């Protein structure tokens, strides 16, 4: 059965954001990677069993407008306004790849907005130059991201949109090593989980270990043999680990005897 969801738009901070909403419960916002919005049906269906899942296309991606946004921290500010408007002021936040970098900035700049933070192979702490993502043959790019070619190749229009999304992500990200982000990671105070696939050809493991070490109390969980885009390739274990992490922090405190 196809995934059931509502397609919505929100006017936020001078941007028109398109997003989907499904499920019920505490709000959970999922921030996509550099390729833009992708309908990860298995991951979204599982997360929506317990949470009100909101998945926006970020500013400048897909049909969402860029407005006056010029940097990653600007995107975090728009995301905070989106959460205030559409999620009641605070939410659990999952960010994958580019979205993980934005999620980290969100927790730094708007700490009251983020209840729990999940960073899935986030960008921002790559040393030694950027990753080549523009101009690669689609099959090679798919192998780097997903570990294999896609079952259903992108149409020409989808490929053009994806290339535009990646160019937007590169523009907004800035340098591969984000020194201000590195310096401010210790200010994150919400419960934080870092996820990583050990066969990731995009982000080095040492970057994930460094990030987890910089955020107080953060935990690193590795998926053995998994590639970069965990939500698409290992949806069941990916969602299960997130559910377990969020449930541990959603649990009410035991009343004193």
Image (tube, grey):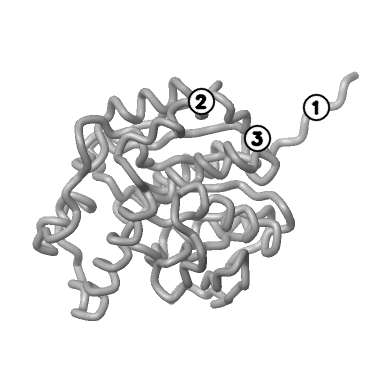
Identify the residue position indicated by label 1 in the image.
254
- CB-based contact (under 8 Å), mark 1 and mark 2: no
Task: Report which quarter residue 33 is drawn in.
Answer: bottom left
What secondary structure is found at the residue carrying circle 3?
Answer: helix
Q: Earlier in the sequence, mark 1 or mark 2?
A: 2
Quadrant in the picture for residue 171: bottom left
Measuring from the top left, give residue 192's x and y in whole percent: 54, 33
Q: Nearer the viewer, residue 28 or 71?
A: 71
Residue 81 in the image, given as x and y percentages of width and height: 65, 58
Residue at position x 12%, y 61% in the image: 135
Q: Quick check: 152 above or below 50?
A: below
Residue beneath disc 2:
215
| Residue 218 is at least partly visible in this image | no
Residue 108 percent coordinates (x, y): 57, 36
> In the image, is residue 88 above or below residue 128?
below
- Farthest residue, direction right: 257
Give the mark toward the camera: 1 or 3: 3
Tell me which label, 2 or 3, sits earlier in the chain: 2
Judge left or right: residue 208 versus residue 110: left
Asked which secondary structure carries label 1, the reply is: loop
Label number found at residue 249: 3
Image quarter where the N terminus lies is bottom left
């Amino acid at each position: 059965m196809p995934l059931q969801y509502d397609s919505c738009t929100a006017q936020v901070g001078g941007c028109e954001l398109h997003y989907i909403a499904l499920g019920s419960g505490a709000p959970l916002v999922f921030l996509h990677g550099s390729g833009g919005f992708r309908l990860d049906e298995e991951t979204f269906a599982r997360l929506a069993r317990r949470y009100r899942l909101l998945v926006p296309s970020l500013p400048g991606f897909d049909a969402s407008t860029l407005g006056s946004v010029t940097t990653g921290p600007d995107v975090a500010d728009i995301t905070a306004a989106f959460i205030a408007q559409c999620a009641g002021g605070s939410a659990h936040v999952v960010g994958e790849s580019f979205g993980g970098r934005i999620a980290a900035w969100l927790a730094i700049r708007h700490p009251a907005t983020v209840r729990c933070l999940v960073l899935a192979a986030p960008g921002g702490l790559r040393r030694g130059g950027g990753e080549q993502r523009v101009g690669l043959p689609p099959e090679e790019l798919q192998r780097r991201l997903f570990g294999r070619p896609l079952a259903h190749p992108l149409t020409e229009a989808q490929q053009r949109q994806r290339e535009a999304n990646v160019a937007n992500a590169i523009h907004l990200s800035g340098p591969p090593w984000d020194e201000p982000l590195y310096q401010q990671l210790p200010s994150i105070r919400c419960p934080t989980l870092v996820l990583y696939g050990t066969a990731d050809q995009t982000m080095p493991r040492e970057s994930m270990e460094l990030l987890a070490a910089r955020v107080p109390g953060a935990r690193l969980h590795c998926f053995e043999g998994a590639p970069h885009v965990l939500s698409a390739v290992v949806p069941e274990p990916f969602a299960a680990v997130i559910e377990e992490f969020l449930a541990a922090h959603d649990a009410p405190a035991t009343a004193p005897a």
